[in-house]
Image (cartoon, rainbow, N blue to C red):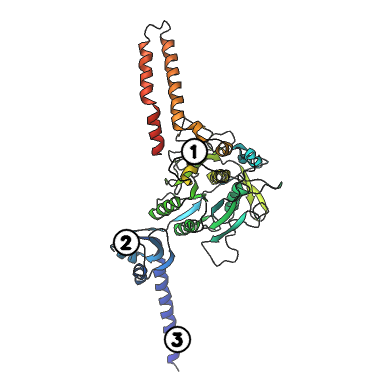
Amino acid sequence: MRKKPQITLLFVLLLILGNTLLSAAIAGERRVIIGFHQTPSNYEQRLIQRHRGKFRHTFKRIKALSAKLTDQAIAELQNNPTIAYIEEDATVSVIEPEFGSSEYLEAWGVSRIGSKSVHAMQIQGAGIKVAVLDTGIDYTHPDLNDNYRGGINIINPELPAGPFDDSWNSHGTHVAGIIAAELDGNGLVGVAPKASLYAIKSLDNSGSGYLSDVIAGIEWAIANEIDIVNMSLGLRKDSQALAEVCARAYEAGILLVAAAGNTGLYGFGEVLYPARYSSVIAVGATSADDTLHLMSASSPDVELVAPGSNVYSSTVYGGYGFLTGTSQAAPHVAGVAALILSAGLKDLNRDRAINNQDLRLQLQSTTFDLGDPERDDIYGYGLVNAEAATTQNPAWRSPLRTARFRFTQAKKIAQTNCNRRDPTKKHQSQCKNNSRYFRTHFRPASAKRRFNRN
């Protein structure tokens, strides 16, 4: 009888020691994405299991899977010849917006880019599938419920509420309203008020999530034949897996639109990933006076800009509010893309296929050019223009015609400058030399080659 307390005490000590060792083992685990040289099969999965890996996602469009592994297991797997790379399953966050004031009484961005006149022509994005890869959507919102078509909660697929937006600032719902708030005389109107909305919830209520959940969300969009995916999120660290899945989505015909990032103040204007990939349209933010917003990224990677300052849109539980940032600019571009598709698109690159490449060219070729001619490092190709994009043939601002215009203007400037320096016109050969210089540097053929490389 006296030995029982000793046995009990020993059991408790062993239990405590076991829990301590287990906690230490768990603390050493990290979420990673493992890329393989070939599509993972049972062999690769067993390989991870032998190293006590805990699976999260097995991807279908890229040769990779995500799992939790200890540092020791990662070190051992690094040398395995079947593995191409192991990278951190990094944290991805929404492009955090600033709260705005009630200075604007309507969705000024929708009007600024010319959507109102497009709506009057009954071009409203009907039948176009737009996915919001974000914190979810309040699909019960009176300005969104009729356009909502479904979605998925990547983080917790079993949750009864599905991809409902539970974020503290209504990030995904705000983005969805900019794209497709209904034209019903109440609340506000989106850029494409009849587009079909899909929610891909890859970020949690704090506005952050894991890279693997974003990748799984993009794969869901491919599998469900989504036309346009808006990603108002980003991270500074490059990812081979994210780059690959974005490339697969683009090859599948999806137009990917992403916020360039609110890095103008503290990040030296760098564009974040995934917006930085060539398969994705990087969108910067403008203010009401068409200047680049001080928060917005600005670099050669910026492709288009759109309204992003004090944007009024939907919030959870039937509300409305103002937010500022490139997170608000990107959905303006996604909405215009939906309008273009519903209006009809031509084979602009003459590859005998009408697809997302033509859609991208249409967006680029019909902008309000705010900066230097053609593409520049601040505004990209310019401010997205819904009216021109849906009603005009982009040939009116084709690279060939733009180059000819610049050539003519350059000759005029050269002639004017020469006449000012030489009013008696005794040395007109200088002007002719100038003309030859401009003919060399602004010839239409070279401009056409530059455009094709983009």
Under tag 3, what secondary structure?
Answer: helix
Residue pointed to by mark 1: 364
Q: Earlier in the sequence, mark 2 or mark 1?
A: 2
Q: Secondary structure at mark 2?
A: strand
Q: Amino acid at mark 3?
A: Thr
The C terminus, quarter of image = top left
| Residue 449 horizontal/vertical position (percent) | 38, 34
Look at mark 3 in the image and give the residue it sits on.
8
Could you tell me residue 280's position as x and y percent? 46, 47
Which is nearer the N-term, disc 1 or disc 3? 3
Q: Position of residue 428 (x, y in %)?
A: 38, 10
Q: Dividing the picture into quarters, in which one does residue 332 lie?
A: top right
Which residue is at the far right? 185
Count residues near mark 1 (Cα–Cα under 10 Å), then give few for <14, some for 14-19, many for 20+: many
Give the amino acid type for the residue marked by disc 2 in the picture: Ile
Question: Circle 2 sits on which residue?
Answer: 83
- For this view, does 407 lie left or right of residue 164? left
Q: How many marks?
A: 3
Alpha-carbon span between mark 1 and mark 3: 75 Å
